[in-house]
Amino acid sequence: MDTYLSVEIGGTKQQVALGHADGTLIKTITGKPALSQGAADILSWLKTNIDELLSRPDTATAEVKKIFVGFGGPLESSTGTVLSSLQVSGWNDFPLKDWFERTFSLPTVVLNDTVAGGFGELEFGAGQDSTNFFYTNIGTGIGGSVFLNRTYYDGLGTGAAYLGNTWIPDWTSEHPGAVTKVENICAGPAIVARLNRKNYVPASSVLSTISAKITSFDLQKAVEQKDTFACLELDRIAESFSIALANFLALYSVDTIAIGGGIANIGDPLFSRIRKFTERYAFIANKKRYKIQQSRFKDSAVLVGGLAASKYYPPV
């Protein structure tokens, strides 16, 4: 079976893996390098760890056919040129496909990371039985990929369905009628920043007893303990995200939505709320005609998606 190199370039986490077209991961290396120099630090980490992966005794005999890269940001699909990163400096107009092909002498396909994750879920996960499918993630950022009649929709050639950059009411603002982007409410960094804002967490909450930086994992644990403030906070996050999902459903009428990313790892406490609020806001043509599922592959979604994409971008 053909072997591929699959790469995830995120705003926080970086991953490289060898695997097969059936979605099987042979060996994975994961890291969170310091990003004092932004993109340069990530490129250095990739070079070091891909060289190591390809030279390991247990993987060196693999004949890699192609590299698939899932990049966390908008890009020009035809050239594999990054337009920008919304989290990491140094990526503007960067020729990422060319860099990979020059550095490793292998043909390379560059996709948005959420698009790669979408391919994985479409082929092997939550979207296997779907005709019109939407994959999104709640992590460092919030992206999206839509597959109509199981065909990826790329918009104008720079991606589409960037759910995190759609607009919703801003309940964090003191100004009536304020709006903001979904990422500014629901993405991991936004949640953590809000929880650590002075006087945001009330003294009555178990979260107020945490002396270190409050994390999304702490929020999850507090919800599991039925903490009143934590449950209200998760309600607000889920409702904001669900407004965006209901708007998306009204436009595309997909039958299945899958959600991945680190915040999605909260699991049922989050998903039960998202399902409730999405159905509340859904247009009548969509009500009860869709399902919302957690990503099957979770933190490996982008890597598995790179392997799945080999079906659509076969070796030449």
Image: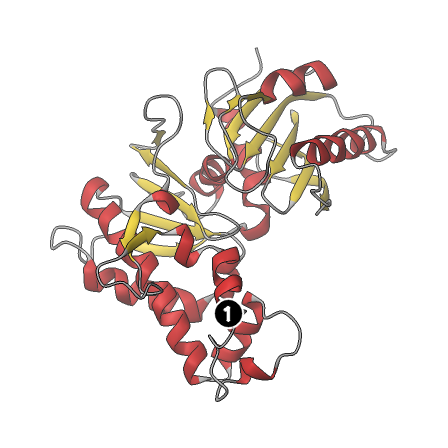
Quarter holding the C terminus is: top right
Element class at badge 1: helix
Residue at (58, 43) in percent of width and height: 11
Q: Amino acid at mark 1?
A: Leu
Q: How is the image coloured?
A: secondary structure
Q: Is residue 105 visible?
A: no
Residue at (58, 67) in percent of width and height: 215
**Horizontal and vertical percent for residue 251?**
20, 41
Give the residue furthest to the top. 316
Q: Is residue 247 left or right of residue 6?
A: left
Viewer-side residue, 24 vs 282: 282
**Horizontal and vertical percent for residue 72?**
53, 38
Q: Residues within 10 Å of mark 1 (few under 14, many from 20)?
A: many
Q: Quadrant of residue 21?
A: top right
Q: In the rendered image of this protein, does residue 255 appear above or below residue 293? A: above
Viewer-side residue, 55 vs 190: 190
Q: In the rendered image of this protein, does residue 237 appear above or below residue 211? A: above
Q: Is residue 107 left or right of residue 77?
A: right
Q: Is residue 276 visible?
A: yes
Viewer-side residue, 95 vs 194: 194
Quarter holding the N terminus is: top right
The residue carrying mark 1 is: 195
Residue at (17, 57) in percent of width and height: 287
